[in-house]
Image (cartoon, rainbow, N blue to C red):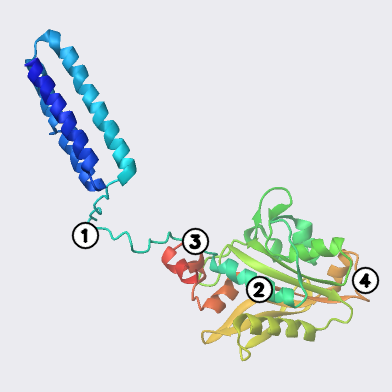
Amino acid sequence: MSEGSQVDLDTIEAAALQAIESASDASSLESVRVGVLGKKGTLKQVLRSLGALPPEQRASFGARVNLVKERVESALGAAKDRLGSPKSKPKATAAGRATDVTLPGQMPLRGSRHPVHQVASRMIRIFGNLGFQVADGPEVEDEWHNFTGLNIPVDHIARDPAENFYLEDDLLMRSQTSTVQVRVMENTPPPLRIIAPGKVFRPDTVDATHSYMFNQLEGLVVDEGMTFGHLKATLLTFFQQLLQDDGMKLRLRPSFFPFTEPSAEVDLFWRGGWMEMGGCGMVDPNVLESVGIDPERWTGFAFGLGIERVTMASFNIPDIRYLYENDVRFLQQFS
């Protein structure tokens, strides 16, 4: 039986090497490999007869089988380098169809800038073209910069704890970006032309046009000979460029702010009615004096615009809450 098995191994090896040498492509080479080394291959069949051999012959026979296997595998490796790997069949999808690898791939989902940030960038660019520079300030403010420096009396309702987010001592989350204009005027002599975009915080009741946290863009001009006409022309030019509509309607409605005199609310005609966009006015002389600027020589105007409301007007969004619900279906419209 040992001699017969030896003859079988020699025959198997010779036939396998001949088949490998004769293989003309990777697919036929793979067929040879499966026929010899596969689970039902000829070498596996020979190994099953190992148990029928006398115990003293099993070791030498097993070693001979492994030697044949190594020679066949070596020949297969050399032939594979010559012919290449066999082409695999296309994998079937869940629907049972084969995947067409020639089709273009699916692009991964890409994020985009939030619509509020998009509009803020446009606002900054427009005001930049009008000669304004961007200024910044802290979101946690002291009472002097948030109130006193803006001519807001100690007993004014704007200082009420119910109207602000107080932290400790005299610190609070700023309720307006007007704090930045005070800091700029403290450290920079006029003439000045700055804008200050940023977040502000007020405990307002959330509705279609109000939120407890929103973005505001403060504007300030201090120069010789500034008038209310300059203020109106600046705002009108800004909204015309932003909305790309020379026929848009803007009105300045008389109002009162402690830090401007005269003061006005800025209203935009939108969706069939007037929507408040912010406040504006001529800088009060007391504010100029508090930061060491001579109001007899210098005059100025200031304005504060709600960036969310400008975003709503730009994209015709009816409710401010849509901007912060993080609904991907909504946000994808602005990518």
Q: Quadrant of residue 41?
A: top left
Judge depth for marks 4 and 2 and give the one in front: 2
**Disc 3 from disc 4: Cα separation:** 49 Å
Amino acid type at circle 2 is Met
**Disc 3 from disc 2: Cα separation:** 22 Å
Q: Which mark is residue 97?
A: 1
SS at badge 1: loop
Judge depth for marks 1 and 3 and give the one in front: 1
Amino acid type at circle 4 is Asp
**Disc 2 from disc 1: Cα separation:** 51 Å
Q: Are marks 4 and 2 in contact (CB under 8 Å)?
A: no
The residue identified by callout 3 is 111
Judge depth for marks 3 and 4 and give the one in front: 3
The residue identified by callout 2 is 123
List x then y, in percent, for residue 221: 80, 74
Mark toward the start of the polypeptide (2 vs 1): 1
Mark toward the start of the polypeptide (1 vs 4): 1
SS at badge 3: loop
List x then y, in percent, for residue 44: 14, 28
The residue identified by callout 4 is 294
Q: Using the image, determine if residue 22 lies above or below residue 239.
A: above
